Image (cartoon, rainbow, N blue to C red):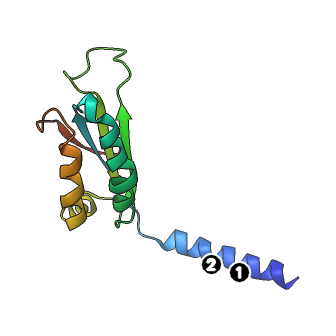
């Protein structure tokens, strides 16, 4: 019987915390179109999955990071020579900028860039609506 009372109190307390919480701003998404050198694709994916994403995931405000490989353009045309899209999602742009300024980001992003055919790429920042 005490367990039931305890659970009711915990749930009631959680409800008060949620109701009293300040409204959150929608997150941001950064999209980067990449032209990865096919001969270095495995290297880029290894850096992303084993180093970059784990380092980003412990940053304040981190929500997700994905590396999308282009399969086909079903409508219109894909950007020329782009074969990957990097997507990074943070709770805010300020938190993303803080991550970009860290020494580990300064080390890992150039390692990914070194696998590209060109370092000239589109970077688009979106607010999630």
Q: Residue furthest right?
A: 1
- Taking 111 as reference, is 60 above or below it? below
The residue beneath circle 1 is 9
Number of numbered discs on residues:
2
Residue 113 percent coordinates (x, y): 19, 44
Residue visible at 35% across and 51% down in the picture: 89
Closer-to-camera residue (15/120): 120
21, 49: nearer the viewer: 49
Q: Secondary structure at mark 1?
A: helix
Which quarter of the image is occupied by the N terminus? bottom right
Residue 108 in picture, x, y percent from top left: 24, 55
Residue 82 in which image quadrant: top left
Asked where in the image residue 118 lies, by quadrant, the reply is top left
Separation (CA) of disc 2 from disc 1: 6 Å
- Label 2, on which residue? 13
- Toward the front, the furthest residue is 39
Left or right: residue 18 versus residue 120 is right
Left or right: residue 31 versus residue 57 is left
Q: Position of residue 90 (x, y in %)?
A: 33, 56
- Residue in the picture at 35% in, 42% down: 45
Label 2–label 1 contact, CB within 8 A: yes
Please name the residue shown 23% across and 34% down the image. 33
Name the quadrant of the C terminus: top left
Whether residue 26 appears in this view of the structure is: no
Q: Name the residue at 68% across, 78% down.
A: 10
């Amino acid at each position: 019987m005490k367990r039931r009372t305890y659970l009711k109190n915990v749930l009631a307390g959680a409800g008060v915390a949620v109701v009293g919480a300040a409204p959150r701003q929608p997150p941001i998404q950064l999209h980067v179109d990449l032209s990865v050198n096919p001969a270095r694709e495995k290297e880029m994916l290894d850096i992303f999955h084993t180093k970059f994403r784990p380092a980003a995931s412990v940053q304040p405000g981190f929500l997700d990071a994905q590396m999308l490989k282009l399969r086909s353009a079903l409508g219109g045309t894909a950007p020329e020579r782009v074969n990957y899209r990097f997507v990074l999602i943070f709770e805010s742009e300020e938190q993303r900028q803080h991550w970009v300024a860290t020494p580990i980001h300064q080390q890992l992003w150039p390692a990914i860039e070194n696998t590209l055919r060109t370092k000239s790429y589109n970077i688009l920042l979106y607010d999630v609506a």
